[in-house]
Structure formats: C-alpha cells, structure tokens
Image: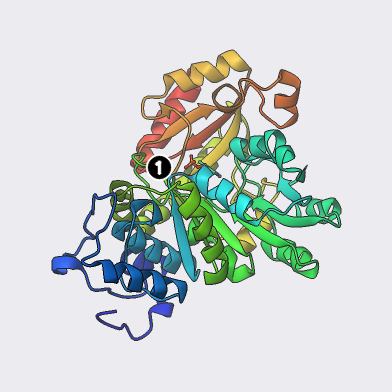
C-alpha cells in the first residue's frame, strides 16, 4: 500500500466502494485502473518461471499475473474494493451472477449431501437444484423463506443452507441471525444471495453468514450495461472458490471489470437514491385505487416488515404489486408506461417493468407457476435513477388507463 490510511475500518460503504481499504500503487499514477487486454503475461527468463512456480507452491507471489483465466489487474482491484464494501476478507469475481452462485455451490457441495434452498428464489438457482443436483447424487429441499421452515428441513446430511434475502419478487426478508444460529449449531455452511440487498443495506458476513454472493450485473454495476457476479467471505473459503475458478474459467474480462469498478464509484449515491425512490413509489402504489396489493418490506403490510426494519438500512428499488384486474388490465398498464422498459433485471439506471409470469416463468405449467405466486396480475418494478416524481407521474397515468 503506497499510503496507509489511519482507520479505513471506519469508512462507510460509499467511501469503501471508491477507495477500498486504502491506496495501492498504480501504473503511471493513473487515478483509474488500467484495462490490461492480454490473455497471458510473459516471464523474462526461464529461471524466473521456476522461481515463480516454487514461490507459488509456498504461497508467495513473485510475478503477479500469468494467464487471463486466473485473473487480470482490473479484476484484482475491483475484488479488493468489493471485499472492503462487503466487510469480507476476500472477493472472487465471476463473469455472471449465476456463475458466482453455481461455482459456490459446486465448490462446497458434498457427495451424498443435501442442500436447503429457500423458495421465492432466483429461477435459475431453483432450476439448478431441480434439474442438475440429482446428477451429482445430491439431495435438496426448497422451503418457505423463514428460519423455522429451514430448521424443519434439515436432515443429517444437510451441509449447505442457500438463502436469498430479500427474495424476488415477493421481497421476503430472512431473519439472518436466526438462520446462522440454526446452521452453526449443526456445522452447516450458510450461503446467501444478497443481490437485492447489497452491503449498503445489510452486511450478512457481520451477522455470521459464511459466503455472500451477488449478481454484480445489478446494483454494483448499476447501469444495465455489464454482466458479472461476485462471491465474498473468509480468505480460506475464497481460496477454495478461486481454485475452482481457475479450472472452470467463468472469469470476467478486463473491460467488464473496468465498467464494474467505475459503477462502484457511484454505488453509495445510487443506493441512497434507490432506497428513497423505492419507498416513495411503494407508498404511492399502496394508496392507489387500481392497485390490489403491494410488496415492499418498508410497508407495515409486508409479512417481513418487522424483520426487515430491524436488519436492513433500506430496501432498494424492486417493488412487486398486483394490478386490480387480470391479464388484460395488467398488460394495458404495462404498455401504457413511457419510462419503464419491459425487460428483466434490476439495479440499473433505466427503470424496468416485468409481468413476472410471462417474462420469467412462461414455460412452467400453469398450476405450478401459480403455486409459487406467479399470478397473471403480478408486476415487478425495478426503478432506475430517473427523477422519482417523473416515475410516479408515469405510473399514475398508466394506472389511470386500466
Ligand atoms: C440476476 C440475479 C442472479 C443472476 O445473476 P446474473 O448476473 O444474471 O447471472 C442471481 N440472483 C439474483 C437474486 C438475481 O437478481
């Protein structure tokens, strides 16, 4: 570290996202991190190769980079900042959120083991459990997103509890300390997908969770223009993940890492906006006569209002609600919006809207789809960075068209 700050542990997320835990020497004294577009890094002499390999075996570093699948300088800097923001010892970046989720599960799953997932989870995570875990001889349960349901689902061979909080689209907030307590008593590892929360709103590692994963495509990137994922935790657990990463190769490219690091510079301001906008829109929707029901944890009507208010600083800008009416009314509302783009994802600069069942669960049998809450009139909003008053006016004029 070229300059040692006196007490970076006191810095808040917005500051950590820009500086990490302090300043490292940078090529040419550039303020931003260079994009090093190369697939490999050369050695000066044949002897240097031997010295490098010997040092690596002893855990020392003589030559920082060797091959781009193993990492690049922009990635390293971005990982350092993400770890600082999350309060983790180390971060491992991936080329997508799903790569982070799956690599984490695959690194820590055990033969004949059993994994508990919480319901209302990301669709691809659910599909990995239902379609692929069996191939490895691994069992799974998908439970209600509560600590009690998780405890009931534990079997003697359960070795991972994989949760999401808040969930999507119903924004269920899990009682993380309660789940950690249940898991620790039995030596079960806890992994949480905290994409919808971000460390701006909750830091699961401080609450005892072993590994946090995020889709960095969402709030960390923040501009709807990149794909990345990250896993964070202790240096020991991340070393296991990194070994898998080197083999599997879901490594983000240098340009993606640059865009992600750039996005992080406005992380704090953006999250503050997302929290404020989410709350304002949720309140407006709840009071609107054309809206049947709203899910946003800051509202007293949300099932996890108490847990959410106790654990989280804010709830971001994903809001789910039921339009009064059926498929036709819901589509008329969506098609009348001027500012919301019809597309999945969240956490970026542009506001997005989805009719959940059609966008994400179309190919599920109707009965099953409805049993997991994907009803015809369910709409999910992911607010962007536009002026909140403009978003509210747009939603109001579209609701008036129903
Ligand atoms: C988007 C998302 C993912 C997947 O991330 P990608 O970057 O799209 O691969 C996983 N979990 C949650 C909660 C998400 O919102």
Residue furthest front in the image:
46
Could you tell me which residue is drawn at 37 percent across and 68 percent down? 16
Judging depth in this view, the residue of 63 and 78 nearest the camera is 63
Secondary element under disc 1, as helix, strand or loop, is loop
Image position of 10 with respect to 236: above or below: below
Crowd band around label 1 with a 10 angstrom C-alpha radius: few (<14), some (14–19), many (20+):
many
Q: Is residue 165 visible?
A: no
Residue furthest top in the image:
328
Could you tell me which residue is drawn at 59 percent across and 45 percent down? 296
For label 1, the residue is: 227
Judging depth in this view, the residue of 288 and 367 nearest the camera is 367
**In x, y percent, where is residue 384?**
39, 41
Image position of 362 with respect to 218: above or below: above
Query: Quadrant of the rendered structure where residue 205 is?
Result: bottom right
Judging depth in this view, the residue of 187 and 388 nearest the camera is 187
Quarter the N terminus occupies: bottom left
Residue at disc 1, CB closer than 8 Å to ligand 1: yes
Image position of 390 with respect to 61: above or below: above
Judging depth in this view, the residue of 259 and 266 nearest the camera is 259
How many callouts does the rendering have? Answer: 1
**In x, y percent, where is residue 93?**
44, 54
Tell me: 266 left or right of 288.
left
**In x, y percent, where is residue 133?**
70, 41
Could you tell me which residue is drawn at 71 percent across and 47 percent down? 117
């Amino acid at each position: 570290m070229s300059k040692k700050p006196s007490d970076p542990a006191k810095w808040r997320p917005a500051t950590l996202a820009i500086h990490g835990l302090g300043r490292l020497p940078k090529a040419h004294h550039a303020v931003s991190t260079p994009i090093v577009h190369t697939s490999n890094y050369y050695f000066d002499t044949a002897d240097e190769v031997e010295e490098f390999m010997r040092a690596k075996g002893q855990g020392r570093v003589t030559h920082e980079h060797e091959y781009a699948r193993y990492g690049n300088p922009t990635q390293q800097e971005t990982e350092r900042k993400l770890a600082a923001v999350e309060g983790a010892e180390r971060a491992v970046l991936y080329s997508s959120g799903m790569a982070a989720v799956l690599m984490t599960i695959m690194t820590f799953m055990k033969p004949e083991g059993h994994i508990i997932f919480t319901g209302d989870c990301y669709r691809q995570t659910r599909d990995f459990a239902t379609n692929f875990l069996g191939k490895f001889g691994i069992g799974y349960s998908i439970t209600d997103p509560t600590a009690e349901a998780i405890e009931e689902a534990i079997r003697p061979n359960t070795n991972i509890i994989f949760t999401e909080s808040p969930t999507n689209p119903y924004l269920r907030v899990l009682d993380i300390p309660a789940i950690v307590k249940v898991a620790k008593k039995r030596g079960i590892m806890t992994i949480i997908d905290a994409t919808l929360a971000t460390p701006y709103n909750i830091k699961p590692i401080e609450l005892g969770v072993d590994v946090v994963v995020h889709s960095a495509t969402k709030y960390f990137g923040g501009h709807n223009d990149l794909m990345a994922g990250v896993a964070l935790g202790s240096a020991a657990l991340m070393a296991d993940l990194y070994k898998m990463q080197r083999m599997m190769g879901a490594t983000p490219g240098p340009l993606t890492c640059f865009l992600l690091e750039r996005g992080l510079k406005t992380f704090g301001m953006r999250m503050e906006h997302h929290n404020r906008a989410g709350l304002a829109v949720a309140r407006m929707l709840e009071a609107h006569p054309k809206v049947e029901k709203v899910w946003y944890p800051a509202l007293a009507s949300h099932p996890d209002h108490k847990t959410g208010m106790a654990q989280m600083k804010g709830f971001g800008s994903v809001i789910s609600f039921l339009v009064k009416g059926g498929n036709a009314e819901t589509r008329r509302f969506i098609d009348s919006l001027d500012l919301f783009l019809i597309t999945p994802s969240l956490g970026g600069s542009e506001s997005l809207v989805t009719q959940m069942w059609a966008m994400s669960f179309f190919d599920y049998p109707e009965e099953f789809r409805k049993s997991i809450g994907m009803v015809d009139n369910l709409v999910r909003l992911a607010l962007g960075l536009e002026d909140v008053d403009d978003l509210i006016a747009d939603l109001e004029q579209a609701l008036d068209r129903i």
